[in-house]
Image (cartoon, rainbow, N blue to C red):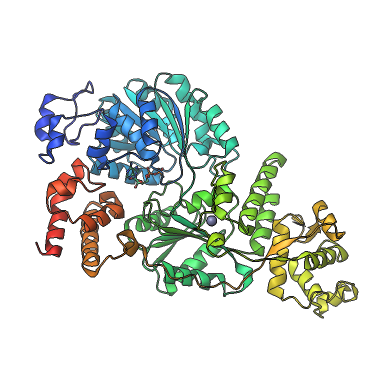
Amino acid sequence: MWNPDEETLPTPDGGVSPGDASALPSEPSSAASGPASDDPQRILAEVFGYPSFRGAQRAIIDCVIGGDDALVLMPTGGGKSLCYQIPALARPGCGVVVSPLIALMQDQVAALRQSGVRAAALNSAQPAADIRATERALAAGELDLVYIAPERLVLPRTLELLEHCVIALFAIDEAHCVSQWGHDFRPEYIQLSVLAERFPNVPRLALTATADGPTRREIVSRLGLSGARQFISRFDRPNIRYRIAQSDAGGGSARNRLLRFIQDEHPGEAGIVYCLSRKRVDAIADWLSSQGLVALPYHAGLASAERERNQTRFLKEEGVVMVATIAFGMGIDKPNVRFVAHLNLPKSVEAYYQETGRGGRDGLPADAWMLYGLQDVITLRQMLEQSTADDGHKRVERHKLEAMLGLCELTTCRRQALLAYFDDELPDPCGNCDTCLDPPATWDATVPAQKALSCVYRTGERFGVNHLVDVLRGRDNERIRGFGHHQLSTFGIGADIETNEWRGIFRQLIARGLLRVDVEGYGGLKLDASSRPLLRGEATVHLRREAKPVRPARRPSSHTRIAAEDFDIADQALWEALRACRRRLADAQGVPPYVIFHDATLSEMVQLAPTTLEQMAAVSGVGVAKLERYGDEFLAVIRLQLDI
Ligand code: ADP
Ligand code: ZN
């Protein structure tokens, strides 16, 4: 059970010694009425400083406190952590959290300790002495929560230790890692089935932000959760604005457009830029740095020390842009990531949803911004076909890539399509995606599409887009002559359409499956059976008109958006002073600033301007332990700034 004073350990039997009360913080008075509580509402207020539960949190918490198993599907930022942290505090014994990313456990543990929760981590990154100390504390019933890496949890030694402890619950975070079809598959997760066998009486809770139907079923069967209650939340992240643009459509190089996007819309703010290859990650990070941004690379080719250093800077400093491959991000719970940019197409809608979901976890506006082009489609198809996976697996991957392309080429609301993919329904267009804000024009592209298809056919279904466009536009060069393509009936029939437009047409035809990329060879295009009706004039095709990208209206940067619109100059100064105070406290302890207080909490301090500890306690995110630790310091900053 939760003991609000982390320094005072309970007696070995897990109970709380009577002496504890004396060590309680004297403010606010509510905490003095009892040393521990198993009432979820009270834990929420006193430990985490929040006034109310969100969405299904309360129902999930009650289910687990009652001893039942649960499967929780909630979007990133939805508030999954409280769903196991509060039952772990309310139930007798220690909550065991299985988490795949050891690098991030430390921050979670640090954040919990700030709130007075007795938390620890067990993973291979720790010195043996620390591991032994944590194991001893666990055995002695001195922990509320322990985070364990899956490979360590399934060691016979750990399982035996746990069998001798009172376990409040098992929480299996990122539960989709158990799925062999998924993109985050972790073989160790399969072995977690042992928990159901060895601890039949301990409630188990599987949590994930990614789960289409098949993945969900796999989680249930592999983790033995057929009796679990399922809590499936809305997948919508209304604060994220989705935008997908074509890099072939003109408007400057991808890197220039990225730079402009960051400079215009997110100056000085934290964000992630995803690229497909390590080389591109390095190049883009260098380029952004040379343009005066703080941009760091992250990919599996870097030495682990450098990766860790960069990740730490991203978490602890403000305004760092992380340029990364998909190796970066799972479990990153930095709340104030203001944008996630993709310079390449993700492999699936799940990956896109999850990667973009790392933006705006604090609920404040965030951008999901993507540029993709023809080459992405070709590269991804090649990677997929050349992989060593078996046919069944490839078929699934192909299907997923197609769904992703479909999302890109949409002319209707992207959020509706995204949610529909997760079997979630949004009745009306969202009004916060590019197709809603700036509806794309479509045009009847039947004739150019027929020309393109017949050019593919006449050249023998073995040439790539560049060559095909040259033939269509009637370019007279050596290569064309070498193949005798200047004599074809399709030579020069598309001179009226510019090269970039042709590339857009080909991209859309490939995206719609009317053309296939020959993956054995060098990316030559082939006709698909579905293109026959179009060629025979029995079908028409409407494509997106590729408008030259216009600069979106500039949005104010987020910290001015955080508070009321009329965040005046005095507020601005107070906001900066509070951030400086947070920085100082975070640096002194070597933790990320948000572990002290989130932006949303500081913003509320600006708005409420509390001048007493009591008023401070009413700010969302200020719990008993943090009030005790930091209340006076932040109050001093407020008084100084407001001159009172
Ligand atoms: P998830 O693990 O689902 O991605 P988190 O558990 O990290 O999300 O929660 C996201 C953010 O929302 C965190 O900053 C957390 O403190 C905050 N949060 C969660 N539940 C509540 C609540 N009931 N009231 C206020 N803030 C909350
Ligand atoms: Zn929309």
Which image quadrant shows ligand 2? bottom right
- The answer to whether residue 592 is visible is no
What is the x, y in percent for residue 444? 74, 65
Residue furthest to the bottom in view is: 476
Vertical arrangement, residue 379 with respect to residue 42, above or below: below
- The answer to whether residue 476 is visible is yes
Q: Residue at x 10, y 39 (%)?
A: 26
**Closer to the camera in the image, 560 or 636:** 560
Q: Residue at x 11, y 35 (%)?
A: 23
Which picture quadrant has residue 25? top left
Q: Residue at x 39, y 31 (%)?
A: 59
What is the x, y in percent for residue 527? 81, 57
What is the x, y in percent for residue 179? 56, 36
Q: How many marks?
A: 0
Left or right: 93 as drawn, with respect to 408 = left
What is the x, y in percent for residue 10? 19, 27
Left or right: 319 as drawn, with respect to 273 = left
Which picture quadrant has residue 472? bottom right
